[in-house]
């Protein structure tokens, strides 16, 4: 059976500026454009053309960037607001966790608020009464239930709202990014509750930015992009596609933001003394410029310029250098720093004993990392040409950035090649989600091992 | 529209609880609490009595003594009416969070406002009773049976107008300010602090076009004037108008319902 049918739904919001212009009765009456203005011909198109079905008992996750229409869609499913065009059909009782505790009145007690909130969500007074103890226990508010809600902390407030909403016993549960309530333990309780909902064959639609949660909880994922369904299907596939897309956009942003700083310094005339003094404090570039680094490129294993690398990928740092006269006293250095500025790795041709004779004209220098074994994050690069005694010709400090992505949320800086091995009284099961995830990890590890 | 009206019956418990909550929350934190429900109409009455006995002596018409009781008969229902409308003009905006985030019929908010004010009105009735006993006015039991009917008629009229006012305010915020002045004008166009018979003939026409005139006179007839309630025609007319206003009001509200969540 189909729990939710969404057919060619389009939702247009009237634009804010127009509403401003129109906010007074006088202006509506005086300007004769009343009728013309009331027509929805311009506005913000939150959803352009969305169609999909959700089968009963499925857990569906909706992902997408901010402003892609996720929350709008959820509100339309909940029946709060109507689509401008298209149809939405829903079978069964809905509980929407869009904003927790939206109906609470601050002046009255938690007890009375539970009753009113429960009835707002569609329960009768008797149904609320029978669930009352469970609601209070789940929210862990036994001691405060008779205090006015205005005295609650925001965490207590959210917990109570969540608890009421989840005890409505809906057929369809709509959740909009509300799992981040309360502490770790409460989050676990919420997740348990979801698992219970799933076991009981309820339908769940979840909007979240936590991609992990989608992969863990959902049977299906839908990726909304600018009001259109960009991908739909197996959560892992959709989430991966989404991650790739996010990385691609980040790449473009890096190129857009990081380039100018380099070109600016590139354009400055070669005035040694001036550089020594002026650049020291300010931008991350200094040196005598007897040898100049003209360009720095990051390349993947296919030789293409890129800024985002997967853990374990090959990365090539390519410098284009030009001496102003033939030089024999020189060395090249590379440093990798993480976002906090902690040095992850640093080396130069001199300490590694690379024998270099003379730099007599423009040249390319490549530093190739076979396997970029760093955890996910943003890293900054230092590149330099300097004399053997360390005096820099041209030093780029943190001027170049790259991003490392990873499927695994391991922590730290360095990701050594590793594998897990078990022997003795350890049994490896495959029957529930968690161990499935574990086995997935294992696969990844084996992969990296065989590389 | 009628399906939606029927749906409201399912929400009666919620309406009841919300109205109770509104009453409780209003006086939470005040020293006198519910006592204010009695004190407010009394103070109002005191002001008007002061005006008509001290400031403007001799303006009181013949045959309307005790004058304080006469005014109270109209003041109490008027207070219910005007504060219901004023508050419901704000009801949807202050409850905007609910409409945007929780699925439930929006008309519950103005209904709750009107009902909470009805409860205030009822709390003011004991004062009226005390006055009636104090002045030794005799009200026949049979005549008193009309009282709940008048209240129901007024309830329908108030609800209908509350629907219109609350929905329109969402689209045009100036309805609120307009309403405030309109209600002041309306108050003086209703025979509450003066008897209808005092108005010159040309004004009688205007008074008769005002539905609240008939309600006020009905209250005065039943509670103040001795003798049987002989102006039933007024109640019939205003009853018909009230039903019409209620239906039109609900129709307008129903029409605007779908875009409410986007506009608040």
Image (tube, coloured by chain):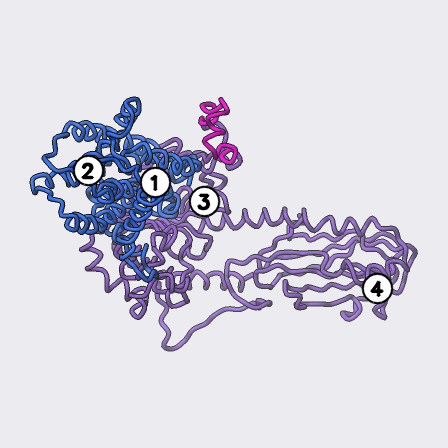
Chain colours: A purple, B blue
On the image, the x and y values in percent for residue A200 come to: 25, 55
Secondary structure predominantly adopted by residues drawn in magenta: helix
Q: Nearer the viewer, residue A207 or A119?
A: A119
Magenta residues (range): A18-39
A191 on left or right of A270:
left
Residue that badge 1 annotates: B56
Residue A26 highlighted magenta (yes or no): yes
Kindly identify which residue carries mark 2: B220
Q: Which residue is mark 3?
A: A223
Q: Is residue A345 above or below residue B232?
A: below
Q: Nearer the viewer, mark 1 or mark 2?
A: 1
**Which chain does the residue under circle 4 lie in?**
A
Q: Residue furthest right?
A: A325
Q: Nearer the viewer, mark 3 or mark 2?
A: 2
Q: Nearer the viewer, mark 1 or mark 3?
A: 1
Spatial CA span between label 3 and label 2: 67 Å
Q: Which mark is residue A392?
A: 4
Camera sees residue B134: yes
- Rendered position, B114 above or below A308: above
């Amino acid at each position: 059976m189909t729990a939710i049918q969404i057919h060619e739904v389009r939702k247009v919001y009237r634009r804010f500026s127009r509403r401003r212009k129109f906010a007074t009765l006088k202006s509506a009456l005086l300007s004769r454009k009343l009728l013309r203005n009331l027509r929805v011909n311009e506005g913000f198109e939150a959803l352009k053309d969305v169609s999909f079905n959700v089968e009963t008992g499925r857990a569906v996750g909706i992902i997408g960037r901010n402003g892609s229409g996720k929350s709008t869609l959820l509100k339309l499913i909940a029946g709060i607001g109507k689509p401008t065009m298209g149809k939405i059909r829903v079978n069964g009782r809905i509980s929407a966790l869009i904003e927790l505790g939206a109906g609470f009145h601050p002046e009255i007690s938690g007890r009375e608020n539970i009753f009113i909130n429960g009835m707002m969500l569609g329960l009768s007074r008797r149904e609320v009464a029978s669930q009352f103890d469970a609601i209070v226990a789940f929210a862990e508010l036994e001691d405060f239930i008779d205090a006015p809600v205005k005295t609650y902390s925001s965490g207590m407030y959210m917990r109570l709202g969540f608890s009421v909403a989840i005890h409505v016993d809906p057929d369809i549960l709509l959740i909009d990014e509300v799992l981040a309530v309360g502490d770790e333990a409460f989050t676990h309780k919420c997740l348990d509750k979801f698992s219970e909902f799933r076991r009981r064959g309820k339908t769940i639609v979840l909007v979240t930015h936590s991609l992990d949660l989608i992969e863990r909880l959902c049977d299906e994922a839908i990726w909304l992009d600018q009001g259109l369904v960009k991908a739909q299907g197996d959560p892992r596939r959709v989430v991966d596609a989404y991650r790739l897309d996010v990385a691609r956009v980040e790449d473009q942003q890096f190129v857009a933001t990081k380039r100018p700083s380099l070109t600016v310094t590139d354009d400055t005339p070669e005035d040694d003394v001036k550089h020594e003094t002026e650049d020291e404090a300010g931008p991350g570039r200094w040196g005598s410029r007897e040898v100049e680094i003209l360009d720095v490129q990051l390349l993947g294993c296919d030789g293409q310029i890129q800024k985002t690398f997967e853990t374990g990928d090959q990365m090539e740092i390519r410098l284009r250098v030009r001496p102003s006269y033939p030089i024999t006293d020189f060395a090249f250095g590379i440093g990798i720093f993480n976002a906090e500025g902690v040095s992850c790795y640093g080396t130069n041709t001199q300490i590694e004993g690379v024998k270099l004779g003379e730099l007599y004209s423009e040249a390319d220098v490549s530093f190739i990392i076979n396997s970029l074994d760093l955890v996910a994050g943003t890293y900054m690069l230092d590149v330099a040409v300097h004399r053997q005694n360390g005096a820099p010709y041209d030093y780029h400090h943190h001027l170049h950035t790259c991003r490392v992505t990873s499927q695994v949320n391991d922590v730290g800086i360095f990701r050594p090649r590793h594998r897990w091995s078990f022997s003795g009284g350890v049994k490896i099961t495959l029957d529930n989600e968690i161990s499935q995830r574990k086995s997935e990890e294992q696969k990844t590890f084996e992969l990296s091992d065989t590389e | 529209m009628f399906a939606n009206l029927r749906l409201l019956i399912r929400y009666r418990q919620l309406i009841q609880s919300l109205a109770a909550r509104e009453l409780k929350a209003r006086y939470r934190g005040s020293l006198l609490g519910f006592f204010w429900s009695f004190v407010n109409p009394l103070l109002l009455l005191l002001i008007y009595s002061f005006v008509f006995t001290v400031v403007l002596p001799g303006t009181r018409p013949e045959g309307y003594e005790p004058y304080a009781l006469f005014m109270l008969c109209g003041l109490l229902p008027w207070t219910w009416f005007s504060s219901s409308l004023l508050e419901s003009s704000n009801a949807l905006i202050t409850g905007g969070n609910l409409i945007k985030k929780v699925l439930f019929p929006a008309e519950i908010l103005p209904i709750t406002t009107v009902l909470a004010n009805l409860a205030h009105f009822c709390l003011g009735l004991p004062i009226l009773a005390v006055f009636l006993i104090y002045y030794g006015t005799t009200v026949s039991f049979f005549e008193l049976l009309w009282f709940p009917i008048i209240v129901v008629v007024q309830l329908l009229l108030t609800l209908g107008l509350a629907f219109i006012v609350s929905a329109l305010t969402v689209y045009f915020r100036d309805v609120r300010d307009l309403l405030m002045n309109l209600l002041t004008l309306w108050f003086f166009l209703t025979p509450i602090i003066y008897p209808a018979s005092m108005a010159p003939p040309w004004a009688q026409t205007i008074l008769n076009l005002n539905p609240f005139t008939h309600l006020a006179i009905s209250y005065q007839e039943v509670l103040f004037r001795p003798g049987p309630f002989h102006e039933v025609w007024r109640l019939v007319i205003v009853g018909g108008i009230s039903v019409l206003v209620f239906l039109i009001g609900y129709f307008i509200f129903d029409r605007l319902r779908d875009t409410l969540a986007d506009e608040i």
